[in-house]
Image (cartoon, helix red, strand yellow):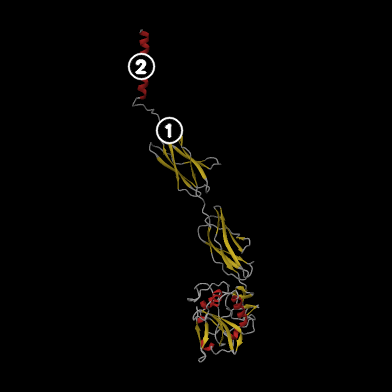
Amino acid sequence: MKANRHGLLKAIAFISAVISMFSCSSCDNEPVLKPSVTISAPENLGASSATLVASVIPNLDNTTVSFEYKTDNSAWKSTSLPTKFSGSSAVKVTLDVSDLEASTQYSFRVSAINASGSATSSISTFTTAGLPKPVIKIKTAESVKISSATLIASVIPNLSNTTISFEYQTANSAWQTKTLTTSFSGSDSLKITFDLSDLQANTLYNFRVRASSKAGETISATSTFTTYAVSDYDGNYYHTVTIGGQTWLKENLKTTHFTNGDAIPSVKDLAVWGNLTSGAYCKFNNNDSIANIYGYLYNFYVASDTRSLVNGYHVPVTQEWNTLYNKLYTAPLEVMNIVESLIETGKVHWTNPIRMGSNSTGFTALPNGSVNVDKDTKTGSFNSLGETATFWSSDPSNGYGSANIINQRDYQLMFFGQWFKTDGFGIRLLKN
């Protein structure tokens, strides 16, 4: 009995010693906890960069924090922060990465290690933004001629090695592509041009611009231009339109020379103009801007001259004007409808027209006005700009000049008449 009692006392003494050891307030060997890590959503997410974020409780001095990230098909890439962390409070830790691929999903995790051990966060994912595609704004084609034109666009490449191509086509044909040999970069808007020189005369073209980079491809809206059919001695260009078998220029004449190089004199003084007995031209109100739109005004001596004004074309005689009208009338159209079919659409140049033009023929008559000479004073005056389209015929009539008038001013909508040879009218040429 004494032996059992002695063993029990020894057991109690051992247990008391163990309890005393762990409850000793003066013990220097207290246990230390490992770090803890909580992952957070990335910040500053871009196409090729991101800021990875985590919350770490170091729990011991000299805790090292490392970030790891990878794509689905790559190995983990690890970066340890150079700063060591300590303390029992949560610390926000970040790593800026800038070697990412656009539009790509990444996995990432964070680990922390100190003398007590290590901890690794759960794995989270993020997807980088897409790269900015090029931006294109199409511009109006410039320097359009008979077989050439300059195509223009405004492009913001956004990325390096952006390639740019100009594409063009006629109706119902395949697109033809011209790729520039130079690549472009940057976020500034750049004016990009391409000169075409293999075009067909008097032809409507569509064109657009395509820009390609690592981010993808951008195709502009489609614009159009029409090449010219012919030019005069001065280098002015003209389109043509065929109506009922007749091919007409679509613009009024602007030349200051016959095709052999002989000059047509310019006369600005209308007091002098009214006494002329030879060819001359002027500009309405002596204004270049008006003349650029409506063409020049000529006296009958130019219209009836046997020298050519544009190769292959001539000033029509009255009968040829009649052929045009008769062809339209047998469509059949009323006389007023004939006028509508010949004049430009809308009110851009016609001032309050009696009948709104449809220009369904494509003739595009503009209200170029006239120079009218007073029979007594022989002095000319500019009249009817915006109201009357005037066209000389080349055949004289009883000592006067013949002309065709489309008048939207006083309800005399269309008529042929006899005029002083010194009056000033436009000239619209007809193909030989």
Q: Quadrant of residue 161?
A: bottom right
Seen at 48% across and 49% down, the residue is 46
Report the disc number at residue 34: 1
- In the rendered image, residue 282, in percent from the top left (x then y), is placed at 54, 82
Seen at 36% across and 23% down, the residue is 21
- Work out which residue is located at the far left of the displayed protein and give it: 25
Q: Is residue 20 above or below residue 46?
A: above
Residue 233 showing in the rendered view: no
- In the rendered image, residue 377, in percent from the top left (x then y), is placed at 50, 91
Tag 1 or tag 2, which sits nearer the N-term?
A: 2
Which type of secondary structure does the marked residue at label 1 adopt? loop
Badge 2 amino acid: Ala
Q: Are marks 2 and 1 in contact (CB under 8 Å)?
A: no
Q: Is residue 391 above or below residue 73?
A: below
Q: Residues within 10 Å of mark 1 (few under 14, many from 20)?
A: some
Q: Tally the numbered discs.
A: 2
Instruction: Tell which of 228 and 63 is nearer to you.
Output: 228
Q: Pick the quarter of the image with the C terminus.
A: bottom right
Q: Is residue 29 above or below residue 360?
A: above
Report the disc number at residue 319: none
Residue placed under numbered mark 2 in the picture:
13
Residue 208 showing in the rendered view: yes
Report the side of 64 relative to 238 (left or right).
left
